[in-house]
Amino acid sequence: MVITAASTADAVREKFPQAVIESVEHRGEQTIIIEPECLMDVCRHLKTQLQYSFLETVTAVDWPERTPRFDVVYQLLSMEHQCFVRLKIRVGQKREEHPEVPSVTSIWPGANWYEREIYDLFGITFEGHPDLRRILMPEDWSTHPLRKDYPISGFELPEPHWGGQVPYTVDPGVGDYYQQTLRSSEGRQFNDNRDRANPSQEPGTMPNPDKA
C-alpha cells in the first residue's frame, strides 16, 4: 500500500470519524485538525499503522482573539513513504490560563524538548510529560514570551544585570508595561547590530582588534 499525505487524511477520517474536525490541502501540504481528546489515539495510529515514525517538530500558535486560543501543531514525516502531514489541535478556553494537552513523548520521545519549549514560551502544559520545566527562560519567570499579549519590548528589570536582562522577583504584569524594555540604557537597544560596541556591552560581543 502506497501512503500519501492525501491518503493519510482519508485513513484518519475513516478510522476516527469522531476525531477529525477538518482536513485542508494547501500548496501540496495536508493539515488534519482533530479533537484534542483524540490526539493520542490518532498519533499512535499514525506511527504504528501508517509509518509516521519521525516527529519533525511540535510548535504552537497564539490566536488571542479566538476561542480556543491556541493551536498546537505536530509536523510528521513518514520516512518509509516519503510523505509529510501536519496534525493540529485547538486548545485554550476563555480564562483558561494554562491549557492542558496530552504529552506524546510516549509515542515520539523526541517530543520532550519541543513540549518543554511550548510550555515555557506559551504556557501550555503537557499531561504525562516526564520532566515539564522551562527550557529557555529562567525557572522563576512567570510569563510566556511567545504569547501575543506579551510586551514586544519586554519588561524593565532591576539591576544588577548581565547584558541588561535578569529574572525579576515580583511579576510586574503586562498591561502597563508595553513600552518598557529588557535592556538598560547602557546596553544594546532592540535590533541594534552586534558590531556596535560600548564600554558596558556584554561579555563576548566586543570587536576583536586583532581581527580588524
Image: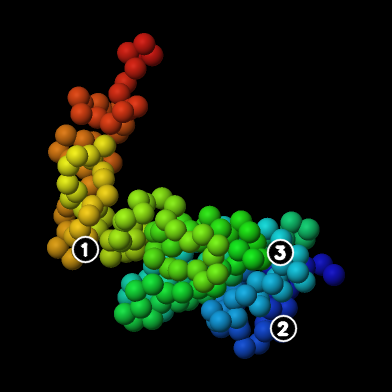
Q: Would residue 76 be visible to someone looking at this image?
A: no
Instruction: Name the element at disc 2.
Output: helix
Instruction: Name the residue type under label 2.
Output: Lys
Q: Nearer the viewer, residue 186 or 97?
A: 97
- Label 2 CA crowd tier, 10 Å (few <14, some 14–19, many 20+): few
Q: Which mark is residue 15?
A: 2
Question: What residue is shown with label 3?
Answer: 52
Distance of mark 3 from mark 1, alpha carbons? 41 Å
Instruction: Name the residue type under label 1.
Output: Val
Q: Residue at x 23, y 36 (%)?
A: 188
Of tags 3 and 1, which is closer to the observer? 1
Instruction: Say which label, 3 or 2, has the lower sequence index.
Output: 2
Instruction: Point out residue 58 in the picture as x, y percentages from the top left corner.
Output: 54, 61
Q: Residue at x 39, y 63 (%)?
A: 122
Distance of mark 1 from mark 2, alpha carbons? 45 Å
Indicate the quadrant where residue 57 lies: bottom right
Drawn side of residue 188 relative to residue 58, left or right: left
Q: Which mark is residue 174?
A: 1
* Most distant residue in the right direction: 1
Instruction: Point out residue 94 in the picture as x, y percentages from the top left corner.
Output: 34, 81
* Most distant residue in the top direction: 210
Q: Would residue 3 be visible to someone looking at this image?
A: yes
Instruction: Point out residue 81 in the picture as x, y percentages from the top left corner.
Output: 77, 60
Drawn side of residue 115 relative to residue 40, left or right: left
Instruction: Name the residue type under label 3.
Output: Tyr
Determine whether label 3 and label 1 are within 8 Å by CB. Answer: no
Distance of mark 3 from mark 2, alpha carbons? 16 Å
* Most distant residue in the bottom direction: 18
Instruction: Say which label, 1 or 2, has the lower sequence index.
Output: 2
